[in-house]
Amino acid sequence: MEDSTVASGTAVLTATAIGKRFPGVVALSDVDLALHAGEVHALVGENGAGKSTLIKVLTGVYAPDDGSLTYQGTPVHFGNNPSHAQAAGISTVYQEVNLVPLQSVASNLYLGREPRTRFGLVDFRAMNRAARTLLDSYGVRVDVTRPLRTLGMGVQQMVAVARAADTKARVVILDEPTSSLEPREVDTLFAIIERLRADGVAVLYVSHRLDELYRICDRVTVLRDGRLVHTGPLTDLPRLRLVAMMLGRDLEEVRREGATKFDGEHTAAETEPVLDATGLTAKHRLDGVDVTVRPGEIVGLGGLLGAGRSETAMAIAGALPLDSGVVSVAGKRLRTGSVAAAMRAGVVMLPEDRKADGILPELSVRENIVLAALPRLSAAGLVSRRRQDSIVDTFMRRLRIKAASPDQRVGELSGGNQQKVLLARLLCTRPKVLLLDEPTRGIDVGAKAEVQALVDELAADGLGVVLISSEFDEVVEGSDAIVVLREGKVVTRLEGDEVNEAALLAALAEDADG
């Protein structure tokens, strides 16, 4: 590729009025983005905002349905061919490293552009020497002859970034580049980005970590629900306003709400905790998280995408191995990392993706509900149909599950009723702690209200509930207390009058560096 250095500040890649549709979904609508030479441009938005789709349009994975792309002043049509974008000088480093794990570090760095001997063979000695020089210049000390897969994810990520920087690309897209990095590796990455900036490269930086954005980025584009919300200098945008934009909240309205006291409907009794999780730590995912829930209390987990909400619930449920930490239920310490141990102690979890991790669509309502209770219902290896029917009838009435009969296939039910079937399955195990990860996602307004009312009833019956939702008003309205997370750490715990959107947004936007 010809090395055509562009003057700093010049638009290198411009996307104009981009639209992209999939069956039943508008992923992007009328989105503009301009990446300039020598600038680091942040792209932010919550889950489903359209960030990944926009990146795929920029890199030729998707052809846009509407709008146009201009690269170095010339209209371009990459079609559905990423190799065209790469050849033009647009390089992407994804969160999941997309190199060749069985090949050496040096081979990955020079994949497709290996130095050759005069006989046309790969000059491994020259390639290894060049690889060492390149990585040393970035402060990465590693044996370049080792297979990439034998190295930690952080080092693999650094190799991917170094490769992108060395291909003379004019645009480098970094998608959550620090997700697997240690703090010193983050410093090394930022040094690489500074070098790219000095060389006039346009960098698109995608991250949910506000501290990083304000440390390294010049400009920011905010997407929400596939639409452009804001573009401008990052220094002109206070953190609180940025968070409000991402979530679609009116800042002044939030501030007014925060000025009034929260009149909570839930009043958990002053009793011993039914759940006491302390110091939950898993490398790159959780860092000393504490969550305490009393009987009858609903504790929300607040945070932006990637804050560690689902990971915290998974750790409590035994589905996420921990490096350290203690989980106790009703005063009894559990063996962490064991779903079976958590379930025996009375901890159950409603997963975020009910289709992938929850319902069995080909089975009936009855079969889905009693699945978890079969050990309790069996006698000498036999399960009484009468006892099954009794439990199924009880929960179908209590949860108001709308089905033609208990024998109807669950896959034929609406999303809200599928969610209720999953809840019934969990509740028939007689749990003490219920972990709800996005319990109202993908269901209609009426079903959402029913599920929310049901959660309130369960808490009133003495169940301890942990609630996760991307809809902040749902967390605020449905919780007695909120544990606010950011980058896998607890920022604060809001209780009583503090449980309002203003306090939650302020905690999320707070500068971690003080």
Image: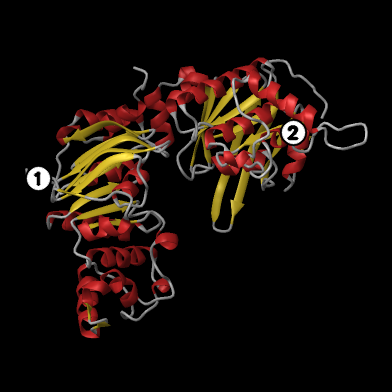
Percent coordinates x, y for residue 37 in the rendering? 67, 20
Sort mark 2 into few (<14), some (14-19) or many (20+) by Cα contacts within 10 Å: some
- The image quarter containing residue 434 is bottom left
| Residue 266 visible somewhere in the drawing | yes
Q: In the image, is residue 256 above or below residue 400?
A: above
State the residue at coordinates (33%, 79%).
404
State the residue at coordinates (68%, 39%).
59
To which residue does mark 2 refer? 110
Residue type, mark 2 in image: Tyr
* Residue 272 numbered tag: 1
Percent coordinates x, y for residue 154 in the rendering? 53, 33
Q: Earlier in the sequence, mark 1 or mark 2?
A: 2
**Lateral position of residue 229 relative to residue 119, left or right:** left
The figure's colour scheme reads secondary structure
Q: Secondary structure at mark 1?
A: loop
* Residue 48 numbered tag: none
Q: Secondary structure at mark 2?
A: loop
Label 1 – label 2 distance at C-alpha: 60 Å
Percent coordinates x, y for residue 294 in the rendering? 14, 46
Q: Quadrant of the C terminus?
A: top left
| Residue 169 visible somewhere in the drawing | no
